[in-house]
Amino acid sequence: MELAKTPDSPSLSISNKPNKPLASKLSKILNSSASEDAKIKAALTSLSNIPDLDESNLRRNLRGTIEKKEIETNKKFLSAFKKVVKQFECLETQMGQMENVCKDMKQRLINAESQTADMIEQADIMQEHSSACSTQIVVADRFLEKFTLNETEIRILSIPSEPINNEFFDALNHLQQIHSDCQLLLTTKNQTAGREIMESMAVIQENAYDKLYKWTQYESRTSFGGDSIDVSALMTKALRALMLRPVLFQTILDEIASARHDAVARAFINALTRGGPGGTPRPIELQAPDPLRYIGDMLAWVHQACAGEKEMLESLFQRNVEKYEDLSGITVRVADTIGDLLDCAMEGTCRPLKSRMEQVLLLQPGAITSYKVANLIQFYTVTLCKLMRKSATLEKVLYEMTELAYKYFFKTLNAQAERLMQSTEPPSRSLSIAPTVRDMTIQLKEILASYDSSLIVATNNTEGFPEFDFAETLDAIIEPLLNTCELSVSRMNKIDQDIYMVNCLYHINNVMVPYSFTKQKRENVTARMNDLLSEMASEEYQQLLKQAGLTQITEAISTKDPKTPLSSLPNMDAESLTNAMAKFDSFLVLMSADVSPQLEKLSSTQHCQQVQSGAIRLLLDTYREISRQIQDPNNGYENPDAILPRTIQDMEAIFSFAL
């Protein structure tokens, strides 16, 4: 608010005012820095906001105006505060009411708590009981699940029209597991439950096994009667399940055995007479003119059939998974079961195989063919023995045929030996081996080669069969041959006999050399050769001794009394011995290092050298003995060195070519 006068008011100054104190205050105010004082500004602003306040009133009663304004303001404040007070009073009333309600609620809660304490305790007890009941329900459900079958399983096991499939075997395994678990229950306090469950499951179990037995019996008759069999997993499971019913299981085994017996026998007859589909392979009977091929084809077919049959049975019984089946205390030896079925199946081939092999052996083919047939049968006997159980029917038949084949073989050799003995022919002047001997050694060579390629030599194993001693075969061939050789030279002189026999023995021995299993026989033949060569060396020595003129001296030394001096014997004086030894020295000069013409007939140069060396060793030993006797003072020779033309060392040097 501005204090200066208005345009219409008269002009006044502070100094002109009658109230000097007020004028001095105003002057002080005006001269101060009131424009910069915020409080002053606020006060003035407040004054400017007072309505109906003119300058004249302001001048007369500013304080009153302000106080009046303040009073009015306070009245307004009091009026407004009365409303607040009323609201607080109302709120106070409501708070009192609420307090009363809360006290009443608290009292009621106290009363309710005292009244529901027993109920809460009873609820806790019921909750614990409910938890125990829930656990019992779970246990009961698990027990029923473990010891009972569901409706689907009961239907699958009991209704005959339901198919046999994997679901059936799963249900049957579950049923069997229930039965096993019930047996455990019988050993606990829950015997009553175990008996009741077993009784309730017994009817279902019997129906299930009756259904399974009929299905398996039908499958056995229809599926196992063909040439080729595709073993189904269901059939394998069925047989494993029926092992728990030994009577039913054995009946099914009999059905399978009968079906396979007829099928294998029929297939073998077809292979013999009809051949394969479309004539390929050709019927085995077409090979009848060739005994070895005929028997070999039959045995090869039997071996293949036996191997295939065993593979099928092992697949059927899962032999590669378990050797023994142990189901609920019932032990089934799978190996025995397979062996019995295989024996029965292959038994169908025994009669036709045996009759045809007997027909071939009765024809008595040549010795070589006869031996090859016998060796072939023995080979397959040992081979099939590995596939079949001991004492199987086919095994016995093959062993009997092996014995019969060897019997006919030795019979053929004996007949051959008799023919050789009856038709002996002397060798040529060269004492070379006769053609008959060569033919027999060729036969021996083929038999040796056949035996060497057989299974018996390759594995050195007869699989428990009595071994057919090959030494007997060698004796049966070689001894008659040597007897024939001796007969053929019986009219010749001794040296020719020995030479020819050595040549024959040497030839036979060379045939046996490549084969280690002839070692014993070769040693015997070599010993006989060495004996003959020693005899020949002795004969050659006697001839050399005669040519050297030492025969009389040697006889005198060997026959004289040890107490009698050698010089006192007739023609044993120093002069006679000097002449004899001079003649011997001349013999040494003229003696040739070549073998004699007679020894050249030996087929082996080594034998010639052996005979020559042996004769010269004997001659050298004789010279040593003569030298020792002459040098012995007891024999009465005054000058021994004059009698002996050469020392022992000289003689050894001379004969070094043969030593």
Image: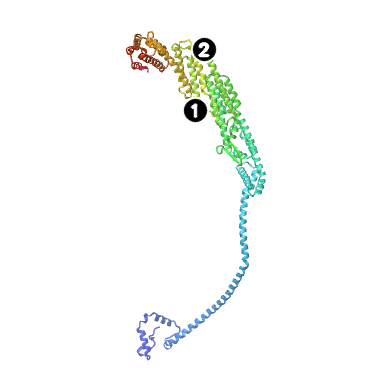
Q: Position of residue 251 (x, y in %)?
A: 64, 35
Q: Is residue 186 left or right of residue 560?
A: right
Q: Is residue 11 visible?
A: no
Q: Is residue 481 above or below residue 102?
A: above
Label for residue 458?
1
Earlier along the polypeptide chain: callout 1 or callout 2? 2
Label for residue 327?
none
Q: Quadrant of the C terminus?
A: top left
Q: Is residue 282 above or below residue 105?
A: above
Q: How is the image coloured?
A: rainbow
Kindly give the residue lying farthest to the bottom in the view shown.
Answer: 18
Closest to the observer, 275 or 625: 625
Q: Is residue 236 visible?
A: yes
Q: Position of residue 601 (x, y in %)?
A: 42, 13
Task: Assess disc 2: are there few (<14), some (14-19) or many (≥20) residues with their C-alpha within 10 Å of its C-alpha.
Answer: few
Q: Secondary structure at mark 2?
A: loop
Closest to the observer, 620 or 217: 620
Q: Position of residue 373 (x, y in %)?
A: 54, 23
Q: Quadrant of the N terminus?
A: bottom left
Q: Residue at x 60, y 23 (%)?
A: 355
Closest to the observer, 279 or 235: 235
- Give the residue type at disc 2: Ser
Residue corresponding to mark 2: 423
Q: Give me the C-alpha separation between circle 1 and circle 2.
A: 38 Å
- Give the residue type at disc 1: Ala
Q: Is residue 107 left or right of residue 582?
A: right
Q: Position of residue 30 (x, y in %)?
A: 36, 84
Closest to the observer, 179 or 50: 179
Q: Is residue 472 left or right of residue 259?
A: left
Q: What is the quadrant of residue 568 in the picture?
A: top left
